[in-house]
Image: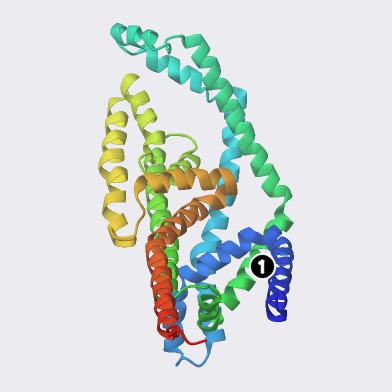
Amino acid sequence: MNTTTLHFRSFLLLLTAVSFAFLSILLPFYAAIFWGSVLALIFSPLHRRLLRLLGGQRPGLAAFLTLLCITLIVILPLLFIAGALANEVAGLYTRINTGQLNLGQYYEQIVAALPPWVHGWLNSFGVGDLLSIREKLSTGALQGSQFLAKQAVSIGQNTFQFVVGLGVMLYLLFFLLRDSTEMIPTLKRLIPLQDEHRHKLFQKLATVVRATVKGNIMIAATQGLLGGLMFAFLGIQGALFWGVLMAFLSLLPAIGASLIWAPVAVYFLVTGAWWQGITLTLFGVLVIGLIDNLLRPILVGKDTKLPDYVVLISTLGGLSVFGLNGFVIGPLFAALFMSCWDLFPDAVAMIQNARRQDDALDSATEKPDNGNP
């Protein structure tokens, strides 16, 4: 081993060690760093437009104005909704704990209103034991409400940590916006790929982040808002909570908000509340159900989204591994996985061409043996 190779391997070892140490330091703030990077990517077009309006000479002012817009459009509404949702969860827990809201009783009312032949069909599938299912639903609802209440208390106790994380995110977001023109070329140079492959990889990364955040979240928020308003119109208690839950479930393709509004509509229909059940069914199918088909091509684009089954699996997996941040991290990793495998044939072809060129060069430079000593 020559001196140059030894020095290079020693440098790689040192680089790996200091990188691991630095990432360990940043790990407690990974959510703030991640969302700061995501928001910088989403609002970079707004920052560039403001920078052009300022003559391209004041990137700091453009970054500050962009940060102000993000605070007014995203941060403050989310804080307001989170506070109202905490109160809603507390009221929901109280109603379930005191027995005012009993899912088992609702299920019993639904089954009692069904025709006799449906009872036999339910018994054949083992779901006709009303007492057992009622107890399970009541226990599950109580456990779920206790979990939500604990989460709300935990968030309240960790207010200082939340404020620090929010401050780190906004501080980082300002510099990411201001120095984006210098950071992006530097990051691209650090990836040991050809320029064409680097461009494809970064383009796919940016596309998936924008599609997941801008498209899916806006669609989910719209569905949750409309669903919550319809629940409030029909006099259903906890409309804000159910609307947020519908918005969250709308992030999952092929499942969506129907998991919330469909059982409520069935309850209305079988208990004789015909106009409420028909209204909620028509609204869920014709309005909430069609929002995805109408808005997704506009906000996301048909040629940029991942297959629905990939989005579903990666979103569920991301949520289980990374928590709430996983609904973006999961599809992001899935997109990187598919992008890297799309680039794999080109990389193999590039290596093969390089080897053929090396072999041809060796053959051309090799001296022929003329028999002389």
Amino acid type at mark 1:
Val
Taking the spot 51% from the left edge, 76% from the top edge, the residue there is: 188
Determine whether 173 is above or below 231 in the image.
below
* x and y percentages locating residue 23 in the rendered image: 69, 64
* x and y percentages locating residue 269 in the rendered image: 31, 23
Is the residue marked by circle 1 packed among few (<14), some (14-19), or many (20+) residues within 10 Å?
A: some
Name the residue that disc number 1 marks: 168
In the rendered view of the protein, which quadrant contains the N terminus? Answer: bottom right
Taking the spot 38% from the left edge, 43% from the top edge, the residue there is: 227
Q: Quadrant of residue 235?
A: top left
Taking depth in this image into account, of 288 and 360 the one nearest to the observer is 360
* x and y percentages locating residue 126 in the rendered image: 43, 11
Element under label 1? helix
Determine whether 202 is above or below 96 in the image.
below
Q: Quadrant of residue 136?
A: top right
Q: Is residue 90 visible?
A: yes
